[in-house]
Image (cartoon, rainbow, N blue to C red):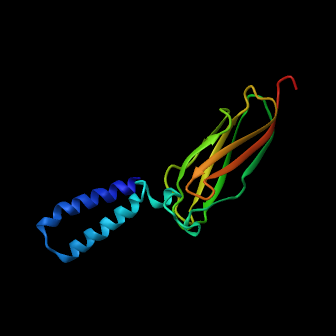
Amino acid sequence: MKLFYFNALVLVGLLCLAPACTNKKLENNIKSLEKRVAALEGKSGAHPATTLENNVSDAELPVMTFETKEYDFGSINEGDVVDYTFKFTNTGKSPLIINKATATCGCTVPKWPKDPILPGAKGEIQVQFNSENRKNLQTKYVNINANTKPEITRLKITGNVVGADG
C-alpha cells in the first residue's frame, strides 16, 4: 500500500511539472508511471498480486512453503505459555501479502509480517499458546489468509496440558 501511495505522489508531482516542460523524455516517463499506477490499482484498487480476482495465473502467484505446518509442544503444566515460530519462504513469483492470521481460540495468538514478502524471501508466523484453564490434549489451528491459492493456509499446534492436580 505504501508503494501505491508513493507512486501516486510521484505521478502527481510529475503531472504538475508536465505543462512547464515539453521534454519528450519527461512525457514518456509520465506515461510509464501512469501505466504502473494503473497496474498497481488493478480492478479493486489493490496491487494485482494482493487478490485473486484479477485473473493472475496460478504460476504467477506467491507460494508459502513452510518448513513444517504442525508443531507438538509436548506436555506442559497448566498456566504455561508456549511460543513457536513457523518459518516459511515465498517460493512463488510475486510478492506474498498476508492479509490476516486468525486462531480458532482466544488462547492462541498469531503474529505475522505486515509487509510484503518478496519472491525468495523468508518470513515467520509466531504463535503463542496460553494454557491457563486448559487441561488435557489440546489442538489449536491458525488460519493464514494471503494472496495465495488456496487463499487459506492452516497451521496446527498440539500438546498435552497437565493440571496442577496431576
Residue at the extreme bottom: 24
Which x, y percent locates residue 64?
A: 62, 59
Where is 153 relative to 31, above or below? above
Where is 16 relative to 107, above or below? below
Which x, y percent locates residue 56?
A: 52, 65
* Residue shown at 72% from the left, 52% from the top: 69
Which x, y percent locates residue 82?
A: 71, 38
Q: Nearer the viewer, residue 129 or 13?
A: 13
Which x, y percent locates residue 16?
A: 17, 60
Residue 10: name its quadrant. bottom left
Q: Nearer the viewer, residue 85 or 39?
A: 39
* Residue shown at 30% from the left, 65% from the top: 34
Quadrant in the picture for the C terminus:
top right
* Residue shown at 69% from the left, 37% from the top: 129
Direction from residue 160 to residue 14 in the image, left or right: left
* Residue shown at 22% from the left, 63% from the top: 14
